[in-house]
Amino acid sequence: MERQMLRAALDKLRQMDALDECQQEVDPKFELGAVLKYFKNERPILFNRVKGSQIPVVGGLFGNRDIYYKMLNTTTADRLFHFMKAIANPQPTRLLKDGPIKENIITRNIDIRRLLPIPTFHSEDSSSFITAGVVVIKDPKTGNSYTSVRRLQVNSGAELSVLVASPFATQQYLDFESSNRPMAVAVILGYDYHFLLASQISSYTYGVDKYQVDSALRGEALALVKCHTVDLEVPAYAEIVLEGIMPPNKRKAEGPFGELMGYYGGVGQHPIMEVKCILHRSNPIFQTAFPCREEHLSNGLIREMELYHSVGNLVKVKDVNVTVSGGCRFHAAVAIEKQNEGDGKSAILGALASSKDLKHVVVVDEDVDIYSHDDLEWALATRVQASRDMVIIPGALGSGLEPSHAIAGVTDKLGIDATKPLGKGAEKFERAKIPGYEEVNIEKYFPEKKIKGGNGV
């Protein structure tokens, strides 16, 4: 049994009874994405029959927090420290002479649409898009490998448009372009939870080889092989790898595309990738992600680590949640152990300083479940007076992915202190409890049913 990448992850998901397998034929144009969206990208689904292709497609792998923690062998309480330790202590990788990814090597007559079942998700999308592709480049100065999820518009034949986006990758490409050199690049499909999480750390902030962070996260060396046509390494147990170059001074229109927060991104002139070689395993599985919850949950997990550290410099933090509903970047909830009046406001300042993307934050006491919309709304309803508990910062720098920011190029930011007062005033905010039964196993009372309830009751 394999230990790394997609097939190992699917085996473990099956053991957890967390993988659905669809035997009904689905059309990669709209239909497949609609099924993933129905489950809010929280249920891993393997589509075994995809119209027009012999290759199955898997999606919805990375959108469920509980599954993610189990696959990383961590818990809600330990996750942030697990991530911090891996980034602070990257571990060596293992270079193999050969691996399953090289079972099939295609270098001629490459037609990406014909070879791969690439979905189209929304009515106004400019083309079909590879949405789960992890792009790898190598820093020529350090030799470090840097990975990130980038969307790739399928143009024609062996050509893709690449939305580079990240500051580090953009600068790398511009450096190559300034000397009229192509940049070697590879796109990896068929990876696992550790690999995706490692790809989400900031290259600029941490400056570490992301493959080595992957090794630290998984507790064993990431197995790599050399690419066939470019000077890059890729996971030996990946499913599909596209090798190629990003030539200098070539741009094509990319977009529109239905993306983060459910809006269409605009059209822009972006670099292209010329695919020179496709590596794939025998009987490969194509990996996709309905835009954009899967990738952004993993990104949000890294943001939570940074948010925890930023707020923790000012107050005692219990936990943080960069919410999925807020795009895993715009909204956060912070639970603190309040020790001084003013801690709520200090936590707001620390949170908003943690990332320019963070737009709204609510700070609550440790008795509030920051993963429950009901609990958070309850705290807002019962512990907030707008005139004294809201902090508004007008005209701040925000995210270009947020449409209301894009109108003016700046955004207002809001912090809400939903903590209760200290001392005698706190008595009025004590929550009513059922002694001995705050959490009950409801299936004990209804053994014939599997019942899902809120807050354990």
Image: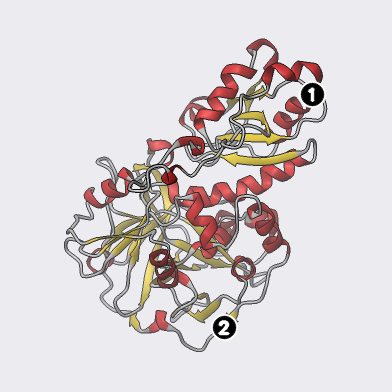
Q: Which amino acid type corresponds to the residue marked 2 in the rendered image?
A: Leu
Q: Position of residue 265 (x, y in %)?
A: 39, 39
Q: Position of residue 48 (x, y in %)?
A: 24, 65
Judge depth for marks 2 and 1 and give the one in front.
Answer: 1
Instruction: Judge from the rendering whether residue 4 lies leftward or rightward of residue 81; answer left or right.
Output: left
Q: Looking at this view, is 143 or 64 the one in front?
A: 64
Name, please, the residue furthest toward the top. 387
In the depicted structure, whether residue 154 falls above or below residue 267: below
Residue located at (48% from left, 44% from top) = 441
Residue holding disc 1: 342
In the depicted structure, whether residue 83 falls above or below residue 310: below
Q: Would residue 180 be visible to someone looking at this image? A: no
Residue holding disc 2: 95
Instruction: Judge from the rendering whether residue 288 lies leftward or rightward of residue 55; answer left or right.
Output: right
Q: Looking at this view, is 155 or 17 the one in front?
A: 17
Label 1 neighbourhood size at 10 Å, few (<14), some (14-19), many (20+)?
Answer: few
Q: Which amino acid type corresponds to the residue marked 1 in the rendered image?
A: Gly
Q: Where is residue 313 in the image (x, y as percent from the top left)?
A: 79, 41
Q: Position of residue 101 (x, y in %)?
A: 41, 79
